Amino acid sequence: MKNIFLKFLFAFMAVVMLAGCSEEFLDEPKPTDGVSESVVFTSRTGVEAFISGIMRRFRGQFTNVDSAGLNSIFYARSMKGNDAMTKPSWFNFDYQNDNREPTYRRVNFTWDYSYYMINQANTLINGVEASSLSASDKKELMAYGYALRGFFYHQLVMEFAPTYSFDLNYPAPPIYTSLSLTGNGMSTVKDVYALIVDDMTKAVDGLTSSRLGKSYINRSVANGILAQVYQVMGNWAGAEAAAKAAYGGNPTAVLNASAYSLGFNDYSNVEWIWGSAQSSDQSSYYWGWPHAGTDHLTVSYSATYINVDFVNLFSATDVRAVFQKKSSSITDLSDYRYWITNKFQFTFDADHSIIRTPEMILIEAESKYRLQDAVGAHNLLYTLQKNRDINALKSVNTGAALLEEILVERRKELYLESGVEWFDAKRLRRGITRTGNQRVKGESSLTADDKRFFLKIPQAEIDANDLIDESVNADR
């Protein structure tokens, strides 16, 4: 880790310059082995410019086409499920659930990118704390750093350890709350989640409803992240409250069925709580997954196909059933290329969704079910279903069947956005069985608590960190 953090520090000033705070970044020589507090942390404007530089790294190309930013992590998760599949292309090894060895690019990218963002969050938190900014500015700006750090530690622990309920003492990625040139040892799942909850609680307390744009974090976004965390932890009262706070508590006010088929590329949509903004002059180009991978109608990779079993879950009047046949020449339903989706429209300025209101509504519905409020769960579920399908009928399911209906609705609503099928299977300790017209079945299916639900620790980290040795991957 010491080598990785040194590289992070070298890259810091470049990130700040991208933020475009002022010309003095370019005019005055600055040290390359540290952070210039005189430039960044003397004003709120300077800190916000630094934050803008951080948020720019949510997109773009971090190392390669399939290792671009947060969207690459989400898309890889989507390919590990049963609802979609890819042709032999960039995410083929993820699709085969075979992309987890210590030297593989997926492993190194997910680790390095997450720690890069955590390092930026720590720089923000530590810099603001030591600054002479006002107490109110300090609280809000540090809260932004806590939210960012909590979010990426959640991605790390989801990717590099079993789920929360499996084993709280299982070795998890190292914890860093400040800049460091030496590596820490492995933590535990319990330790990481304790940090995440503490960070997100402080984020919710310190942030406000205002923000520079929808690609930035505010209190609603922080509540959305906390709802996802509590969902994994099984803290249903906390998940219910956070999810409701994230979307505002009035489902009908934050749903827009007519926009579902417009291409999922505009974060101004009322349903988007948090999205990654793109612009033509700062485009993610062809590494803008899922748009570049799913769009078969314009110049893109045309790499993603939809399982016939998943398509069959939708009624003809459901606005989310934006599927079509790949080609009139493909007539065999067993051909994996039979169905494609028009959910995502590929353009060079396509925005990427991160958290949307329907996810929060469904987290609240699941929480109500877990808290024995079946009526409340039914009502929320039906509100969403009726919005999406004018012919929807209110469910009469009870018990486990009601939970399954909520989980299926999550898949139907969020497919190819953030890997919801994988996320739910992992947190609930279920398998994913490949069915339908999947291109690869058999051994690519996942059993409950399958080790392929998480990645091995990168060999580069083992080589660079004196406190982590080869044994960390012995039974991973």
Image (cartoon, rainbow, N blue to C red):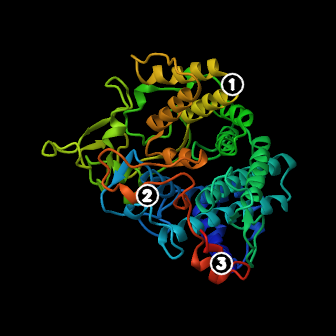
Judge whether residue 16 can be spotted in this image. no
Is 26 displayed left or right of 76 in the figure?
A: right
Q: Secondary structure at mark 2?
A: loop
Indicate the secondary structure of the residue bearing disc 1: loop
Q: How many marks?
A: 3
Identify residue for label 1: 372
Packing grade of label 2 (10 A; few <14, some 14-19, many >=20) is many
Which x, y percent locates residue 107? Answer: 53, 68
Can you give x and y, in whole percent of width and height, for residue 476 in the image? Answer: 59, 68
> What residue is pinned by disc 3?
471
Quadrant in the rendering for residue 176: bottom right
Front position among marks 3 and 2: 3
Q: Residue at x 47, y 51 (%)?
A: 278
List the residue tagged with mark 2: 284
Q: Quadrant location of residue 288?
A: bottom left
In this orientation, does residue 252 appear?
A: yes
Q: Amino acid at mark 3?
A: Ser
Separation of disc 3 and disc 2 at Cα?
Answer: 38 Å
Counting residues from the start of the chain, the first of labels 3 and 1 encountered is 1
**Identity, as a three-letter code, of the amino acid under mark 1:** Gln
